[in-house]
Amino acid sequence: MALPAVDLGWWLLAVLCYGVGDYVTTVVAVRRYAVVEANPVVSRFLSQQPGPLGFAVLKLATLAVTFAGYLVIADSPIAVGIPIVVAAIGVLVTLSNLRAIIRSRRLTANSH
């Protein structure tokens, strides 16, 4: 089954924002700064400071499950809503992670 171009575009954005953006900012935040994972699901399955490999596996699993859900309803006009929501969540959590990194850097700079 070929994805409609619009849906494919949203899935690419979802992978970039949720998959790459959240992954990179989370790993940087918990490895380089004094930031702990705020997502209770991630904390429960991995830890408050998830390692890069475990977090990557969790991200890929989440994307796989959401894509499988999309495929189940792909013929529905609302199917495109799945990647749109995943992309929006990705933007929000990436921005939240960046904010946490900036806050941590400021606290570190002020303590010296």
Image (cartoon, rainbow, N blue to C red):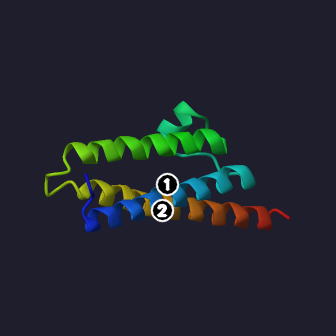
Q: Which mark is residue 19?
A: 1
Badge 1 crowding class, 10 Å Cα cut-off, few under 14, some 14 to 19, many 20 or more, is many
Looking at the image, the residue that sits furthest to the left is: 76
Is residue 36 among what the camera can see? Answer: yes
Question: Across the whole image, how many numbered discs are drawn on residues?
Answer: 2
Q: Which mark is residue 16?
A: 2
Q: Quadrant of residue 29?
A: bottom right
Q: Quadrant of residue 47?
A: top right
Considering the numbered disc 1 on the image, is that residue within a helix, a strand or a loop? helix
> Which amino acid, mark 1?
Gly
Left or right: 52 in relation to 4: right
Q: Quadrant of the C terminus?
A: bottom right
Q: Residue drawn 77% across and 62% down?
A: 108
Taking depth in this image into account, of 102 and 66 the one nearest to the observer is: 66
Looking at the image, the residue that sits furthest to the front is: 1
Q: Are marks 2 and 1 in contact (CB under 8 Å)?
A: yes
Considering the numbered disc 2 on the image, is that residue within a helix, a strand or a loop? helix
* Image position, residue 81 (x, y; %): 24, 57
Looking at the image, the residue that sits furthest to the top is: 45
Q: Residue drawn 40% across and 63% down?
A: 12
Is residue 48 among what the camera can see? Answer: no
Badge 2 crowding class, 10 Å Cα cut-off, few under 14, some 14 to 19, many 20 or more, is some
> Which amino acid, mark 2?
Leu
Q: Residue drawn 13% across and 52% down?
A: 76
| 23 w.r.t. 105: above or below | above
| 73 w.r.t. 91: above or below | above
* Image position, residue 15 (x, y; %): 45, 58
Q: Which mark is residue 98?
A: none
Rounded to the nearest angstrom, the CA distance separating label 2 from label 1 is 6 Å
* Image position, residue 73 (x, y; %): 19, 46
Taking depth in this image into account, of 3 and 61 the one nearest to the observer is: 3
Left or right: 20 in relation to 4: right
